[in-house]
Amino acid sequence: MGIKKSIALLGARRTAEAGDRGAAVGKESSDRGGAAAGAVWRGRAALAGVVAACMVVTTIAVTGAGANPVGMKFAQTGHLIYNSTLGTVFRIDGATKNVDAQVKVPSAGPGTTVVQTDKSGFILAQGRTIEFGKSDLQVADPLPAPATERPVVMEAAGAAFAVYQRAGAVQRLGENPATETLGGALGQSVVTSTGTLWVHRLSTQELCQLPLRAERIACVAKVTAGHTGALALVDDQPVFVDTTVRELRAVNGDGLGRAMSFAQLDIPADAIVAAHDVAGRIAILDRSKNVLQLVDTSQVVSGRPSAEPVVKRLRPGKYEQIASSGDGVALIDATDDSLVTLDRDGEPKTRQKIPPPSKDAKTAKDERPSLFRGGDSRLYVDSKAGEHSMVVEGNGEVTEVEVAGRGDEKDENKTTPSAKPSQSIKPSQPVKPSTPTKTVQPTEEERRETPTPANPPKTKRSDPEREKPETNKPKPRNTPRKPAVQAGRPGAPGDVSATPGDGSALIKWTTAAPNGTPITSYVVSWSGGSRTVEDSDRSLNVTGLTNGSSYVFTVLAENRAGRGAGVSSARITLGGAADAPVGLTTTDWPEEVMLSWRQPDLNGGRLLRYEVTQGGVNESTTAASYRWSGLSTGSQYTFQVRAVTRSADGRVLVGSNASIAATPGSGADGTIQISHGRSGDYTDSNCPEGTSGCAFILLNARNLAPNTTYMFRAYASEWGELHDGGFELETDADGNLTMHKFHNSAVGQQVWVTVDGPGGHFESNRVLWPDE
């Protein structure tokens, strides 16, 4: 019989009949006794029972206490971890570093991985996949997994992925599930923010993609046979790092793209490559020498020259895992199971021991700590048995989270901090219940009717009734009034959104529920930084960001009781409009003008076209030049050129203008000079067999239109046209061309060349072809 368990919800309300909090807690414990396998939301003493929500697999955007979570939009943030000792899945809020939800699944067993989408969660036990549905709050029956090995998991918008590397199987989980067994082992896989999975088939050296809505994997490129390497993402664009020839290649749906060599580096074939870039650089780990190398990818991504690689020697160790948050690097040293974090330049930040399993822990035979990058770009390091997780922010700051404090099952009233920060952060303390101020004295009746807090403050009161010794005489029972609401942490902000700008992002949100005490501030955080704003603020413009990079922003509220749950925006990719085209020049001819320029900084975007404007007329081209004809010779015209780009998140942006004035017909005429060039070893109609003196014509064209194609033809006085049809040749950025072309053996004949194109027809000098 399959497992089918409902996930129980604990509401925000407490029954008015409960005379004190201890009785209410006892009643809840009793109610839960028959549903040990259901989900449990555990109220903490500081919250005084004002906790409501549902489990499980992603952050719930709650704007007020007691809101019904069904049908709400789920933001894919935070992290799920399976504690095999307790047989429970726990959710960690990445922003607050608190464990805020749990569900009992004792049958999953050690070595279990949990992964999430925006609507479901999946427990990947050995040989089984168990789904948590959020719309009906139920756990579905287990389904067979493609393999029994522990998969590599990834999360992206709308989907999660499990890659069984040894078995060569791929499983997409979510609303559009798909499973493919490719056969043969798989290398490192990556998933873009739009949900496209890329895999590397080691047996065939193919690079294959599975778009979010596609039903089958398509292999679109092939790596050279025998080469080693790994897939990675740079600004959400897949690349292949070839460690054999030390080359970086862009990858897209059409195959392999632009290439960049880093042959100057000493990188072994078995080097480990981080799956995500570090501020535009690929992190490559040489395990044999304990060396980290950061390779700038500008040449591949944007066509700009790449900076020199950064090479950093690490402390001796056995480094087996590496991951990037986008602004820093984390590694696991298996020598002593330590977490090591580095900044974007490879400088050390922290080194912290990963907590070992408890004496009662249930672990798999080959289990080891795991390093995982979440959908919020934070890194999560899960200890063996899942009893602890370490949250790594983009700046390298580490916070240790104990997953379900030991003894929780026995003592519901025990309150312990859920997060143990690194040295730079003070642990949060339990919040004491509110007490009356000194200027307002409660009445005798209020003292009798107010429930006693779980942890009463140590203050003196003049109360004769309290000072009397206890007797067995039953106390009169008073009819209680509605208990006073105790202060709790604030709720979550609503409608968190992020709008990309030029090196900036505008973050907006709506008010969070104060839960008994006023909100004092809001905190906006992202990979690489955070800002605290006033309680009245509902937006923040974050500047100093990197165009072309992707960001997720998390907003949470604070009051005197502490920090509330964070809500994250959708991932956005920054990119401003392109700069003005560089080096705009003109070449003037009768009735026409040739404009030429160089590509500007596209600020992270992809070039769609150039727009050339004159007198209200707009023309477009994809080349870095344009010939504007039909003008009046001797009249002055003003031209404007700008680049139109598409940002990584799909926006079409119009760049800045470059402007220049030109007068058709005022330019100098082009020229073409020829001479006898280098010898050629050919036997064809231009150098017939039995003739001598076969050589090239050396062309020297000057003052033609820059970056423009012209038709060149060569002639001999007796043979006529050489190389029938001629050649289309392109001038350089200055309108010049120097080239050996038109081999021939027309010894004793007059030889010349003509040129046709913008500006008219040009004819060269004539040369008597020598026999040499």
Image (tube, rainbow, N blue to C red):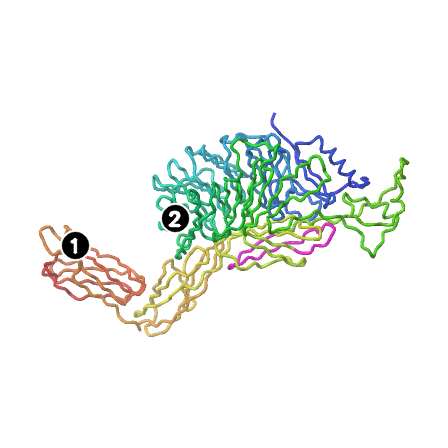
Query: Quick one: 507 or 20, which is closer to the camera?
Result: 20
Q: Element under label 2?
A: strand
- For badge 1, the amino acid type reads Gly
Please provide percent x and percent y for residue 433.
Answer: 76, 48
Q: Is residue 575 magenta?
A: no
Q: Residue furthest front?
A: 316
Please provide percent x and percent y for residue 537.
Answer: 65, 58
Query: Quick one: 148 or 332, which is closer to the camera?
Result: 332
Which quadrant of the view contains residue 732? bottom left
Q: Residue furthest top?
A: 1
Q: What residue sits right under mark 2 in the picture?
A: 248
Bin the neighbour count of mark 2 within 10 Å (Cα to Cα): few under 14, some 14-19, many 20 and up. many
Query: Quick one: 675 or 668, which is closer to the camera?
Result: 675
- For badge 2, the amino acid type reads Leu
Residue at the spot 37% in from the left edge and 64% down from the top edge: 597
Could you tell whether 656 is left or right of 587 in the image? right
Query: Quick one: 756 or 351, which is closer to the camera?
Result: 351
Residue range highlighted in magenta: 496-521
Tell which circle, 2 or 1, labels the residue nearer the N-terminal end.
2
Please provide percent x and percent y for residue 561.
Answer: 71, 50
Bin the neighbour count of mark 1 within 10 Å (Cα to Cα): few under 14, some 14-19, many 20 and up. some
The N terminus, quarter of image: top right
Q: What residue sits right under mark 1 in the picture?
A: 680
Could you tell whether 456 is left or right of 93 in the image? right
Residue 497 visible here: yes
Residue 259 visible here: no
Q: Is residue 88 above or below residue 510?
A: above
Q: Element under label 1?
A: loop
